[in-house]
Image: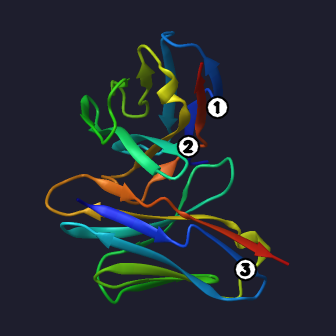
Amino acid sequence: EDQVTQSPEALRLQEGESSSLNCSYTVSGLRGLFWYRQDPGKGPEFLFTLYSAGEEKEKERLKATLTKKESFLHITAPKPEDSATYLCAVLLSGGYNKLIFGAGTRLAVHP
Amino acid sequence: EAQVTQNPRYLITVTGKKLTVTCSQNMNHEYMSWYRQDPGLGLRQIYYSMNVEVTDKGDVPEGYKVSRKEKRNFPLILESPSPNQTSLYFCASSFVGPGELFFGEGSRLTVL
């Protein structure tokens, strides 16, 4: 069964304390992996797309990386405004238009 | 401003009373989709549409209907809502296919 698992479920950091969020997947075939940010009471906002192992994307304090089994979202020197839920999603290959979301990691960054 | 607009944002209704949640996008996107979000379960796809008059079931389509008569609109219809349809609903769109999606602000539905 195709599955996307995010860990940890929740993460509390002090401002400036770098860390990583994990998205592991077991799928029949991967066409792309996507990261989103979701603020409370809002819809998810697209951050990154990764297509192949070894690929990296960066935006401000965030860097997403991809291996054959998992993706990491690295947060460097986070600020309180980085507090949000981060979602990853896997687009299956093989002609399926299926995007499977993980349950998300709730990140809280405290001053 | 590029946006996906959902209405209503909040709704409390009773079992069996038909309701429609509207979704409209102003980006000329071909792909539109509906998701529900429940605690611990993540986003699950209800229905999607690759283009006008082309719709297909997602992972949890039971109890829902959709239509795509115009490119910009993709309403979600609950013919006879039940309490297990209490959830947070999101409409999303993209140029082609799922992936880099634009999401609406969400519609929180409570069925009593």
Q: In the image shown, does B86 or B96 lie closer to the viewer?
A: B86
Residue for badge 2: B104
Q: Indicate the amino acid at tag 1.
A: Arg
Task: Tell me: A84 left or right of A35.
Answer: right
Q: Indicate the amino acid at tag 3.
A: Leu
Residue B50: tell me if it is visible.
yes
User: Disc 2: which chain?
Assistant: B
Residue pictured at 58% horizontal, 49% vertical: A43
Residue pictured at 31% horizontal, 80% vertical: A69
**Image coordinates for residue B52, horizontal then vertical, percent:** 28, 32
- The chosen color scheme is rainbow
Decide: is A16 above or below B96: below
Q: How many marks?
A: 3
Quarter of the image with the C terminus of chain A is: bottom right
Co-location on one chain, circles 1 and 3: no
Report how far apart the C-alphas of labels 3 and 2 lie in the structure: 29 Å
Residue for badge 1: B9
Q: Which mark is residue A13?
A: 3
Would you say the residues marked 2 and 1 are in contact, meaning their CB atoms lie under 8 Å apart? no
**Image coordinates for residue B108, horizontal then vertical, percent:** 61, 33
Q: Indicate the amino acid at tag 2.
A: Gly
Residue pictured at 47% horizontal, 18% vertical: B81
Residue A75: tell me if it is visible.
no
